[in-house]
Structure formats: C-alpha cells, structure tokens
Amino acid sequence: MTPTEMEDKLNNLDRRLEAVDQILPTLATKSDVNRLGDELRNELRNEAQSVLAAAKHHTDIRIEDVRDDIRMLAESVTGLITTTGHVQRTLETVVQRLDVHESLLQGLTRRRK
C-alpha cells in the first residue's frame, strides 16, 4: 500500500469516526431504556387503574338503575296481586249470588209446573 493510499484510508476512517461520534450522544443507554420502561409501566398502571375506576363507577350506576327497575316491578306485581285478590273475592261473591238465584229460579220453575 502506498503512503497516499494509507493517508486516504486514514482520512476515510477519521470521517467515519466523526460520524459515529456525532451519533453516539443521541443513542439511549441501558439506564435510559430501563428508566423509560419504568415510566411506561407506571403510566400504563395508572391508566389501567383510571379505566378500572371509571368502569366500576359506570357499573355501580347501572346496578343501581337495575335495582330501581326491580323495585318498581316488585311494587307493580304486588299491586297486581292485591287487585287479583279483590277480583277473586268479587267473583266468588258473584258466583255465590248466582248460585242463590239459580236455586230460587229452579224453585220457582218447579212450583209453576
């Protein structure tokens, strides 16, 4: 190799090393990566807790709505049971009176014959 070729190689090597020297400060170190990983985990944990809290709050509201609906339904069913009981007693009374009237009518028709 001639001295000129060796100088060219050394100059080329110097330029490449200068480029590497410029890039090196921008690269993350292992501690940088670990720190960023820890920060990301903490942010994800906080976000997950926030989403979980919001979901729990929404679920609690929906459960309370369902309880209210069940309470109203139970009151309606109770009212229907009461009304059905009144109707049942009224029908029993009507049937008893009809039985009495039927008996009276049968007695009257026997007398006429």
Image: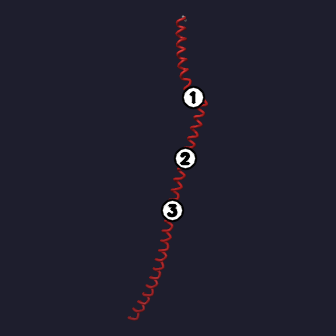
Q: SS of the residue at dot 2?
A: helix
Q: Residues within 10 Å of mark 2 (few under 14, many from 20)?
A: few
Residue 60: give x, y in percent of width and height: 54, 55
C-alpha separation, residue under disc 2 versus residue under disc 3: 27 Å
Furthest toward the top, the residue is 2
N-term-proximal mark, 2 vs 1: 1
Examine the rendered structure and indicate whether residue 14 appears above or below residue 35: above
Q: SS of the residue at dot 1?
A: loop
Q: Is residue 41 left or right of residue 102?
A: right
N-term-proximal mark, 2 vs 3: 2
Residue 27: give x, y in percent of width and height: 56, 26
> What amino acid is found at the position of numbered circle 1 in the picture?
Ala
Determine contact: label 1, label 3, CB under 8 Å: no
N-term-proximal mark, 1 vs 3: 1
Placement of the N terminus among the 4 image quadrants: top right
Q: Nearer the viewer, mark 1 or mark 3?
A: 1
Placement of the C terminus among the 4 image quadrants: bottom left
- Residue at 53% of width from left, 12% of height from top? 11
Specify the label residue 68 is tagged with: 3
C-alpha separation, residue under disc 2 versus residue under disc 1: 30 Å
Q: SS of the residue at dot 3?
A: helix
- Residue at 51% of width from left, 62% of height from top? 68
Where, by quadrant of the figure, is residue 48 drawn? top right
Specify the label residue 6 is tagged with: none
> What amino acid is found at the position of numbered circle 3 in the picture?
Asp
- Which residue is the site of mark 1? 28
Residue 86: give x, y in percent of width and height: 48, 77
- Which residue is the site of mark 2? 50
Residue 35: give x, y in percent of width and height: 60, 34
- Residue at 53% of width from left, 57% of height from top? 63
